[in-house]
Each structure stands twice: as structure tokens, then as C-alpha cells.
Image (cartoon, rainbow, N blue to C red):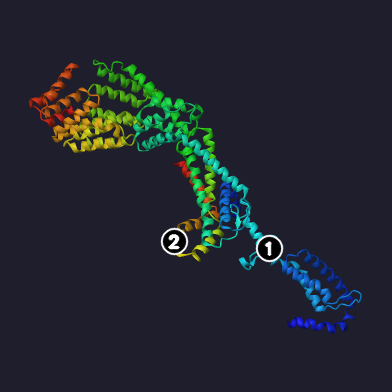
Amino acid sequence: MDENENKKSQPSDMPDEVDALDRELEDLREMFQKQLDEETAKALSKEENADKDEQTEEDGEAPEDKEYTEEDGFLIQPLDEIEVSAAESEHPEEKTETHLCECCGEKPCDTSFGEDYPYCSDCRALMKANPINPCGILAFVLMLIVCVASLFITAPLVDDYDTLLNAQFAYEEKKMTDAVSYYQTYLSSKSDDDTISMKAVRNTIDAMTTLGYYADADSLIETYISESKLKTPKYKKYAGIRQEYTLLSDTSTVINETLPDISSDDFDYESAIKKVDKLIEENKTSQKYSEAFLEYAKYIVMLKHEETYETQLAQLKKIEEVDGGKHPWIYLTHIISAAAKEGDIETATAYFNKSLEFNTQEMSLYVSYADVYRFCEKPDPDKMIEIAQKAASVYPQNASPVFYRTYALAYLLKGDAEKAMTNMSNYMQSCQTSVADMNLYALCALCTDDEDTYNKVVSSLEYYGYSIGKTVQQYKKGKLTLQQVLTDNGGDI
Amino acid sequence: MTTLYIITKYLTFPGALVRGFFEQLVCRICGIPVEDNRIVRRDELSGHIEHELFPKSRGAFAVCFVPAFMNGIFAFLLCLCPFVNLFMFEMNNVLSTILSVLAYWFAFSLYANSYPTIEDALNMKEKVYKQGTVLQKIVYAPGFVFLYVGAFAERYCITFLLAVAGLIGLMLL
């Protein structure tokens, strides 16, 4: 206010100074007039701006208030006021931009959202209604389409996935028998035009080779894996399987040619062993055949000749050594069986555990392994039952029938003849039986004093040209105890 | 780092666009002005839209959480089929393989663009943990930690690296 009052009091002193500053003021007048015109024009164009309106009014009134007339050549406006106006007009945007909307640059900022809020209310409303980026919408729609399309392609295969999942779980749990069964179900349901899971194909081949089904594996490779694919690193292994199959086939052929009479009763053991040894010797230089298979042929000859279990075990371990773990299915079951007959719990357990790494569902392994607790120094029927139950848990579909016989033997050892008879009856009904099985059935009948069943078994055996076993007859006559019948002489009943 | 950040956004632009879409959707629902709706661009806001900060805790949390949650859900759904087709069973079909690769890339990009900007994360922290109620602090805590850490991780391209690691992990499964 003091300044304004000072400014207002100055005009009365101005006439004395006008003469001295006439030229300079004339120049200044022209400059300020030009500036004033510009500001006035600008102010008029911004009618809606209240602050600007006020500014415009002040600027507009100024010439009238200050009684400026060109005719008189007299400038009534005080000089220091003119200087202030000039200072303000040097940077006109500084004053206006701090208050105007950053977006439109026309309206004042909406200070209700804060003193420094940079936008006016109209621009804010427009920003709130800012349309969603079309690229975003497009991407979202495209994503939905891909999502739905993937589901449409995947949904019809749900049944296949179910089978494949079961197969894969079985495969990972080393339940190879189940895995092969599931995979074969899946593959057989597919025509050539269908989408095939290559992982299923690979796993099937792997499972088959683990079980020793090389012919089936070779057939699958031929059907599903092209020659060009077999050259890629991922499938190179399968080219190797094909070569392995060829080698095994050749070996099998040469063994059949060398030992044509092996299945006949009058085959010459010494001569057969010599032939196989000669073949093995020749193969060491030519490497045309599988050495492990040739050694296996030698083991078969020994088995046929009923060599001692020690000799058989030694031969089987030789096969293992020669094979180098490539075909464990050749010897594992035989080693466990031989060790069991010897009552060698340590060897049998070691090889049984080893065999579980390849396939937990090979029932013959469990049967052989359970036998080791029958032939060992102190027979343990409870352990036999435990092994049978373990087998049932890994292969419930098949274990029960197979293990009726093991249960029967275990219950006979425990002295529970009734349970033994029940299990053996079930076994006879559900499994293909051998002469040894019929003798065991007869033994169970004798233990339970079931004369009728015993006589039926004897007549059955006679019908097929066999007679009842010597051990059973000796037990009937009281020459052997039940324990002796079951555990002595390799348990041959 | 900003250059690397922008490159990752360009590499995963579908996910960035979808995230921007959800972010703007939340802004529209909450009535928050969007200053710039461009999503993939050459600055550190790439992958996000430029919007005003949310004044309330609920909105501040929503703008961080909703896009992350939706991206996560869609990434999982998109990941499922390619995983089954490509890695789990290795389906031998051209159409299925192409679609699976596309879906997998989408899923990958969605995951790499799940997290909010650092500004939004800091605003969420301010609104929820300085102005919010005790109940809000408790309820939002798990999401807050996830989003807050994720925002910084995304700024330094760590989420992109994690997505790459996830891709490799699935292939090795």
C-alpha cells in the first residue's frame, strides 16, 4: 500500500523531469505501447480466464486512468510504474504458466487436489475418461484367443493324458510292467495321423529294453522315429538300441544253430559246453555276437545239466561281469534264484535290491527272494509272508495269485496247515500249475488229513503220466519231517 | 539399466501390454486420471501407464495387485497347455507345437511383467502402512511384500531373469 501511495504521489512531480528525459521517454513510450497492444490483444482472446480478465481490465484501463495522450506528447504514467510494467512484461509466461493447466495451457489449475496440482478440472475429467490403449485390449484379446485355442487342442486329449500320466508315474516308480502296459494301451489307441507323445514313445522303448523286450522296442523305433531323427543327439541312443537288437538277434540265431538239441533229453553236456566255449573264443576277435548272451547260453546248458548251484552262481556272476550292466534282465532273476537255493541271504538280498532299481514289478524276483528265507539256516516264514505282501503292494493286480504258493509254503513252515491248504487251493484255481505245485498241493492235503484231495492229486498226476514226488511219499510214510521236505535238497518236493 | 529394462519390455511386449491394460482398467474403475496411456515406450515407465497416484489405500493396493494377479492367473493358464504338450508329453504335432510355443511366450511375458512400478509400490506403502487401518495392514501384508519386492526386482530386470530361469526349469523337468 505504501508503494502504491508513493506511486500515486509521483505524477505531481513528473512535469519537471519530462524535459530532461524527453527523448528517452519517447522511445520507452513506443516500446511500452507496443507491449501494451500485444498484452491487450492477448487478454481479449482469453475471456474465460478470470485472472487474465482482471489483468486485461487493469491493462485496458491504464491508458484511460493514466490520461495518456499522444497529442500532448505528455506521458502522465509515472516512470517507476512504467519500469515495473516493463519488468513484468519481459517474461510474461513465468507468471501465467505457474497457474495454468499443464495440459491445455489455458485454464487455471484445479487447486482442490493440492496447491501444486498441474491440471485443470476439465483436463482431469478428460484424463479420467482417457480411452484404454487399443494395443492393450488387442494383446488381452489375443492372449484369450491363444488361451482358449490351447485348451481346445488340449481338452480332447484328456483321456490320453490320463493314461500317459499313469504310465509316467509307473515308469518313474520303476513299475515297468505297468508302465509298458499303459504305454501300449496309449500307443495302440493312436492311428498314424494322430498326435503322438514322443516322450511316451521314448519311455516305452526304455521300459521295454529294461525288461528285455528288444524286438518290441525295435518295432516301436521303426514305427515312430524316422531315420533322420535317429541321427539327432536326443535320439542317438535309439539308433544304438536298434544295433543292439540286431546283435542280440544274431547271437540268438548262432546259439540256436550251435546248440540245436539243447531242449532234447539226450543232449551231450560236454560237447555243448565245448561248442559254446569255442564260439566265445571266436567272438573275442570278431565281436560279431553279444558275449554276455553267449555266456548265458553256457549257463542254460549248465542249468539243463543240473550243475551245482555254486557253479551256476559263478557262471551268472561271470555273465554280469561280461555284460557290464547293459542287460541286467539276463542274469538278475537267475542269480537271486540260485542264491536262494543256496540259502545265501546276503547275495540274494543284494541282487534283489539291485533288481528293484530296474523293475519293482518282476514277480519272479519276489518269489525267488522269498525262497531264500525257506532255504537259509533258520527258515523265517514271517519274512516270506512280508515279501509276498510287499509284492502285493507294488503289483496288486498280479501279486496275489502268484504268491498263494509262497503263503502256502510259509504257513506250512509255521505249522498252520489249514491256511496253507486254503492258499494252495486258491493257487491251483488261479494259476497254471506244474508237477511241483501239484506235489505241494498233495503235501498240504496230507498235512490237513484231506485224503480225498490227496487222492485226486495223485490220480491227476497219473493221468498226465507222472507219479507223486518221492519226498511227499516219504513224508506220508513218516520217513521225513515236514521241515525236511520243505527245506532240504533245494526244497524239491 | 534403463536401456536393459526397456529391452526386456520390448522382448515381452504382450505381457507388458496386458499389464498396462489391467492397470488402466483399475484406474478407470477407481476414477484415477491417466496422463499417458502409452504402454510400451522408450523410458523407464515402459510396461506401465502414466497415471496419478491413488489417494486411498484400497486403490493404491488394487493398482499394484490386480494387474499382478490377473497376469499371474493368465500366465498359469497359458503355461499349463504348453507345459503339457511341449515338455511333459512332447506331442509330435506342428499346430500344437506352434500354439504351445506362442502360449508359452505369452505366459513368460505375462510373468515378466506382473509387478507394479516403484512409484506405485511406494505409494502403496505410504497409503497402506502409514495411513491404512490395522486390519488393512494385516490383510494386505502378504501381497504387499510380494508386490513391493517384485516392483524393485522388475525395475532391475530380475523378474525377467526369473522368468528365463523358470522356462529352463520347466524344460528340464
The image position of residue B121, as x and y in percent, is 53, 59
Classify mark 2: residues with Cα within 10 Å, few (<14), some (14-19) or many (20+).
Answer: few
Q: As rendered, which of A126 and A429 lies closer to the eye? A: A126
User: Residue B96 vs residue A302: left or right?
Assistant: right
The image position of residue B115, as x and y in percent, is 53, 53
| Image quarter in which the C terminus of chain B is found | top left
Q: In this view, which residue lies farthest toward the left?
A: A478
At a point 56% along the width and 63% down the height, the residue shown is B55
At a point 64% along the width and 57% down the height, the residue shown is A127
Q: Is residue B100 visible?
A: no
User: Residue A67 vs residue A397: left or right?
Assistant: right
- Judging from the image, what secondary structure is the residue with disc 1 in? loop
Chain holding disc 2: B
Residue type highlighted by circle 2: Ile
Residue type highlighted by circle 1: Cys
Q: As rendered, which of A359 and A148 lies closer to the eye? A: A148
The image position of residue B35, as x and y in percent, is 63, 57
Chain holding disc 1: A
Q: Is residue B142 visible?
A: yes
| Label ID, residue B138 | 2
- Judging from the image, what secondary structure is the residue with disc 2 in? helix
Quarter location, residue B63: bottom right
Classify mark 1: residues with Cα within 10 Å, few (<14), some (14-19) or many (20+).
Answer: many
Residue A184, above or below B160: above
User: Residue B134 vs residue B109: left or right?
Assistant: left
The image position of residue A379, as x and y in percent, is 17, 36
Quarter location, residue A143: top right
Q: Are marks 2 and 1 on the same chain?
A: no
| Label ID, residue A101 | 1
| Image quarter in which the N terminus of chain B is found | bottom right
Q: As rendered, which of B69 and A361 lies closer to the eye? A: B69
